[in-house]
Amino acid sequence: MNNKIKLRTPGYYKNFHCISSECKDNCCVGGWQIDIDEETAEYYSTVNGDFGKKLRDNIDYDNLCFKLKDGKCPFLDNNNLCGIYKELGEEHIGIVCDQFPRFTEYFGNVKERGIGLACEEAAKIILTDRSNFSYSETDTDEDVFDDSEFDSSLADMLMLLRDEFMYVIEKTDYTFNQKMIIIINIAADFQNHINNNDYNSMNKLYKKIKQHDFNSCFISDFRQISFNELEQNMASVWYAYLELETLGDEWPDFTDKIMDFLHPENSNASENNEHESRKIQYNQAFEEYTKYLNSYYAENTAELENILKYYIFRYLLKASYDHDLFRKIQLAAANIAILRDMEIYRFIQNGNNFSSDDRMDIIHIFSREVEYSEDNLETLAEEFIFDDIFKSENIIKLFNFSY
């Protein structure tokens, strides 16, 4: 019996290599908080000489992170290369510095590793990949370990379901919005069976999904909604994201402008006319943006599909620990809707123009704020539970339009 863990990575993972000083928002210079793991911090406390003193002088021991200087890691040289690497060797770089933008999750006898959208080079690789989603598996020397919170039976089912979601995303018969609605509805049904610990019904639902008859099963409730309703729903989604802890200067600046331009609050009667004018402005901007993408941005759908596949790969199997599959799909759907609004605003600011570089920049800002703070992910998870806008019947409305 093989008790060693297998490493599973997406097909594009092997293409990632850090471009270091060539990166426009190097994670060592862009104002990122650079955490230090306890083992590395303990080692740094033993380093002698001038470099050891520099290490200790530039570590915030209360928060276990480096003290940035003008937003930069204090150990960068004049070429923005790592002084710790040069002085102490690769083996003494902290886990965060060594692994970012890679992430790793353990699921029984498998650990999955991928690359995150907060890194511009990783985002470029993910968005430009045009192959069907695939995995590579390799052996490791790590022993399988028991985790009382891990539900192996549910994990097996979720792995099968994840493959079906990838099939839906890559299927050419449906628009991207229809694919979103199919996945949201399937996840909501599955969650009901998970809540009841009903594996028999889960298996029946999975067999139904395997038939790939999605028209009759999962998108029969598709209906066109008005732009006014869409604007109101998006404003409600935004309120959850405005509660997040701010990690970088770009995020609050971006969100303040978006809320003022696309979703102004109707705070008093004297502002009603302006508010209605802004609603019309949102409707027109949304329509112009979507028409532009359909006409001039040939890679739009493929890139959106890759973003969705990334979210499903990264988060869905985590439900094998918390039994909360639907929250993972809520996160994917809400994130994509928020990214869409950010793109609409950029499109208008660009004079009705939008490029892949714009999308990369927006994704980078967004992922850095949302995905790289456990507190922010937990805040969103709470909102998904208690805010009605994130119920399945409401969140599908974010994609119930034909543009």
Image: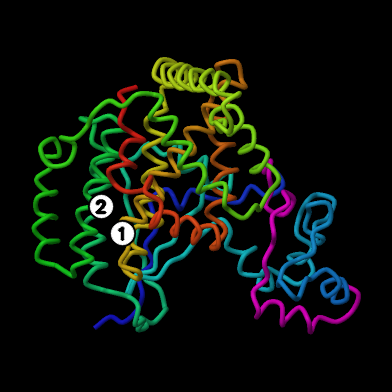
- Pick the front one: 261 or 100: 261
Measuring from the top left, give residue 372's x and y in whole percent: 56, 57
Residue drawn where x is 61% and y is 30% of the image:
260
Q: Is residue 183 above or below residue 275?
A: below
Q: Is residue 11 left or right of residue 351?
A: left
Write the residue at 45% across / 20% down. Answer: 283
The number of numbered discs placed on residues in the rendered structure image is 2
**Residue bearing the label numbered 1:** 325
Q: Amino acid at mark 2?
A: Ala
Residue toward you, 24 or 278: 278
Which mark, residue 187? 2
Q: Is residue 360 above or below residue 114?
A: above
Q: Residue furthest right?
A: 50
Q: Dot 2, how many residues are within 10 Å of its Cα: few (below 14), some (14-19), or many (20+)? A: many
Q: Amino acid at mark 1?
A: Leu
Location of the C terminus by quadrant is: top left
Camera-side residue: 155 or 346? 346
Q: Main secondary structure of the magenta part?
A: loop
Residue 221 quadrant = top left
Which residues are the magenta region? 23-50
Q: Is residue 377 left or right of 209 when viewed as pictured?
A: right
- Give the spatial CA distance, label 2 vs label 1: 7 Å
Residue furthest front as drawn: 269
Tags 2 and 1 touching, CB below 8 Å: yes
In the image, residue 371 lies at what x, y percent? 52, 54
Of 101 and 91, the residue lying toward us: 101
Residue 45 left/right relative to 8: right
